[in-house]
């Protein structure tokens, strides 16, 4: 399987403030990617951005609750402006509902 060539390219990551999203951001930063970090946890985004920027990574943060359609569209426009040639979108954010499928 080919490895994603991230050097000099941009990736957007949802759920980036912690967990799998943060680890994905760290891995892509090590590969030279520019990152758009997306999460509703402002403090977590700021901590991760500071960590990655200290290693020389190019990072923008986009605090948004993706359940809010208008806020998500606005964040999308911000990301497009900051990263006009976005290569990948990695979704590590999500929500779940418990119950029957009916």
Image: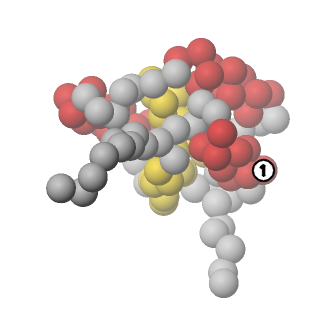
Residue 57 in the image, given as x and y percentages of width and height: 71, 38
Q: Is residue 79 left or right of residue 25?
A: left
Neighbours of disc 1 within 10 Å: few (<14), some (14-19), many (20+): some
Residue 97 in the image: x percent, y percent?
A: 34, 42
User: x%, y% of residue 25?
Assistant: 65, 44
Question: The N terminus lies in which quarter of the figure?
Answer: bottom right
Relative placement, left or right, of 92 versus 34 is left
Task: Give me the residue at 60% from left, 43% from top.
Answer: 21
Residue 90 in the image, given as x and y percentages of width and height: 50, 53
Q: In this orientation, which residue lies closer to the viewer: 101 or 72?
A: 101
**Residue depicted at x 70% and y 45%:** 23
Q: Circle 1 sits on which residue?
A: 30
* Left or right of residue 55, residue 93 in this image: left
Q: Is residue 50 above or below residue 30?
A: above
The correct choice, above or below, for 46 with respect to 8 in the image is above
Q: Residue furthest right?
A: 55
Relative to residue 7, is residue 45 depicted above or below? above
For the question of whether residue 49 can be seen, the reply is yes
Residue 85 falls in image quadrant = bottom left
Which residue does the image show at 47% across and 50% down from the upper left?
Answer: 91
């Amino acid at each position: 399987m080919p490895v994603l060539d991230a050097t000099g390219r941009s990736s957007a990551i949802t759920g980036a403030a912690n967990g799998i999203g943060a680890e994905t951001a760290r891995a892509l930063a090590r590969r030279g990617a520019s990152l758009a970090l997306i999460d509703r946890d402002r403090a977590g985004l700021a901590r991760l951005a500071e960590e990655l920027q200290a290693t020389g990574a190019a990072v923008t943060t986009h605090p948004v609750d993706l359940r809010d359609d208008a806020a998500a569209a606005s964040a999308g426009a911000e990301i497009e402006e900051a990263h006009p040639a976005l290569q990948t979108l990695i979704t590590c954010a999500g929500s779940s509902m418990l119950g029957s499928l009916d």
